[in-house]
Image (spheres, rainbow, N blue to C red):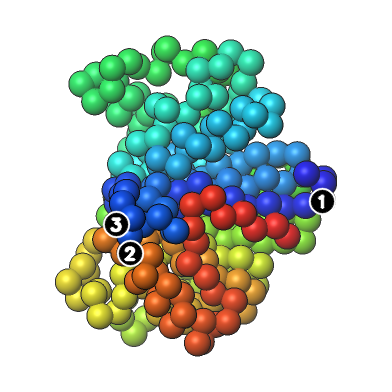
Amino acid sequence: MKSDKLELKFWGVRGSIPVSGPEFERYGGNTSCIQLSLGGRHLLFDAGTGIREASAALREAGVTDIDLFFTHSHYDHIIGLPFFEPIYNPKVSVNLWSGHLAGKTTTRGMIDQFMRPPWFPVEPDICRATLGFRDFTPGDVLEPHPGIIIHTVMLNHPGGAVGYRIEWAGRIIALVYDTEHRDGLVNQAALDLMQGADLVVYDTTYTEVEMPKYRGFGHSTWQEGVKLAKLAGVKRLALFHHSPSRTDEELDKMQALARESLPDAFAAFDGQTISF
C-alpha cells in the first residue's frame, strides 16, 4: 500500500449478534470490526466476530504492530478478541485502547473480566504478544502515532460508547456508533465528529418506524444518519451496525431509500474495502 493512501476495510458490519444463512450472504453476518490502514500503520476498531478474519489478513501481510480501539464492551464488540491471533504471537505488539469505562475500570481490567473462566477457558496471561493497555477519557485527543490524530466523544448508549474522528494527511474518517438520537434534537456530539468528514460510519440499526419499539436500546436510524450527514457536509455515509434480522433484500431497500436524499450513501458489507 502506498504511504499516502488511506484504506478502510469492514470486517464485520452486523450489530448485537452474528448471523448466518442465505438471506445474509451479500452483506455478511460478522459483528463490528473495522480496519484503517494509513501511513504504514494498522488501526482496528472493535473486536467483534469480524476480527478473526482480520487477524488472518494481518498475519499474511506480515503486520507486527497493531492498535485496537474499543468503542465499548458489549458482547458484539468484544467477543472476537480471544480469537484474534496476534495477541498470542510473541513477535507482535498490540496496543489496546478504551475510554468508555473511564473512572470505573481500566482497559486491562475490562479484558481480564471477560476473557477468563467460566466465560472463556483461559485468561489473558496466556497471550504472548507485547500488549499495551491505553486508557483515555472521552473528550481526549489521541495521537497513537505521529500524524494520526483521533478525537474522542462519549455517545448516547447504555453504559457509554466512544465515537472516534480520525484525521490523517488531510483526510477525515468518523466512526459514530453505537448511539441513539432523540426526536427533534440534533445530536451535537455526533455532528461534531462528522463535520466535513470524507467518510462517516453511522449506526443505522433501526428505521424511524421501528424506533418507538426500541427506544432506550442505544441505536439510531438511517434517516437520522442521512440528516446528520447533510448537516455536516459529509462526502460519503456508510450505513452500519445492521440489525441481526435485516436481510440482504431489506438492506438493499434501505440503501436505495438513503440514496434518494444522499447519493453517496451505502450499506456496508463484510469484506468491503474503501480507499482514499
Q: Are marks 1 and 3 in contact (CB under 8 Å)?
A: no
Disc 3 secondary structure class: loop
Q: Which quarter of the rendered picture does the N terminus lie within?
A: top right
Residue 125, image x and y in percent?
Answer: 41, 13
Which mark, by number, is residue 247? 2
Depth check: 194 or 235 in front?
235
Residue 198, image x and y in percent?
Answer: 66, 67
**Viewer-nearest of discs 1 and 3:** 3
Disc 2 secondary structure class: loop
Give, as a three-letter code, the residue at label 2: Thr
Residue 69, image x and y in percent?
Answer: 51, 41
- Residue ID at (35%, 36%): 79
Which mark, by number, is residue 4? 1
Residue 25, image x and y in percent?
Answer: 40, 55
Give, as a three-letter code, the residue at label 3: Pro
Q: Residues within 10 Å of mark 3 (few under 14, many from 20)?
A: some
Q: Which quarter of the rendered picture does the C terminus lie within?
A: bottom right
**Viewer-nearest of discs 3 and 2:** 2
Decide if residue 162 is in sight here.
no
